[in-house]
Amino acid sequence: MSLPNRLTPLYHHLRHSFWSAGIETADLDARIIIRYHTQLDWGDLITNPDAKISPSKLARIEFDVERRLSGEPVSRIYNTREFWGLDFQLCPDTLDPRPDTETLVEIALDRLAGKPPERILDMGVGTGCILISLLNDWERAEGYGMDKSFGAIRMATSNAQRLGVADRCHLWVGSWGEALGLTFPLIVSNPPYIPVAAIESLSREVRNHDPILALAGGPDGLDAFRSILTEMKRLLDREGLAFLEIGYDQRDDVLRLVEESGFRVKDVHPDLAGVPRVVEISHGDN
């Protein structure tokens, strides 16, 4: 691959290469790769379009472009993802946070705006993106997060330290709410909800780079919801709220499980695309 050594031609070349490969985020990915190696951003494309790129930087850009064309997401190439205005580091043991999940953070902050919770439990914490984002907005809240993966807990701990909430963020390896004696006014979770048989049909960016543990939700995709709802019976305060992310076609199934568990579905919130994304749950008497 021979890359142009001027900023604007290089940007157009990368964007075209990614579009031709069917990459929907071609424009964004091209800008991220260029910025990472040159510190030139969108403003430079307008004010300094003929900026020259050195051969050494072009070589590094070419290497990362080949990785992207092979199906590796930019977030995995650089092990970082922006979420709720914060930069989260990733590792092979963590799910790559998606913009859809910001819906959960937004709804929780909105619903509890008048009465921020003292404690938050994140079941399946991953990178810590949900819990840390909430703690960043609610400066007096204490956060608790668990995950089955030691690597995920280590990554979430690192993110909490970098983002300044480590003193209020308590993380440990565990399965959902086991051995936890506290109750919580707010429980959040983005559990694995992909049916096992559907894993192979996912995009290669997801299938080849996100950990199976964070994707596979059992034969029907609902195993994690069953476990979470069981644990929530003792963990959710009587006046507390829970917010669970769901798959695009799981609304009716999850609502059925919630009602069978004795909880009340207060609302189902759509993401920016209008897809049902977050189920809001209470004990039924509030």
Image (cartoon, rainbow, N blue to C red):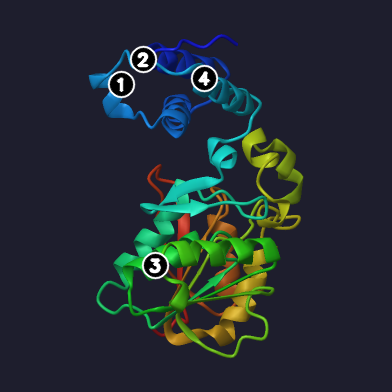
- In the structure shown, which secondary structural element does the residue marked by tag 3 occupy? helix
Say above or below: 192 vs 26.
Answer: below
Residue bearing mark 4: 58
What's the distance in space between the residues labelled 4 and 3, CA to CA? Answer: 39 Å
**Residue at which label 1 appears:** 45
221 lies above or below 199? below
Residue position for label 2? 8
Q: Nearer the viewer, residue 216 or 167?
A: 167
Q: Confirm or deny contact between disc 3 and disc 1 (CB under 8 A).
A: no
Query: What's under tag 1, amino acid-wise?
Result: Leu
Q: Are marks 1 and 2 in contact (CB under 8 Å)?
A: yes
How far is the residue under mark 2 from the one under mark 4? 13 Å
Using residue 157 as the reference point, say whether residue 15 is left or right of it. left
Is residue 139 left or right of 191 when viewed as pictured?
Answer: left
> What residue is rendered at 44% in x and 12% in y?
5
Q: Earlier in the sequence, mark 2 or mark 3?
A: 2
Q: Is residue 186 visible?
A: no
The quadrant the C terminus occupies is bottom left
Indicate which label's residue lies in the foreground, 2 or 3. 2
For marks 3 and 1, the one nearer the N-term is 1
Position above or below: 240 against 219? below
Secondary structure at numbered mark 1: helix
Which quarter of the rendering shows the N terminus? Answer: top right
Callout 4 amino acid: Leu
Residue 136 at x, y percent in the picture = 36, 67
Q: Amino acid at mark 3?
A: Leu
The span from disc 2 to disc 3 (Cα, nearest Å) is 39 Å
User: Which of the 4 image quarters holds residue 43?
Assistant: top left
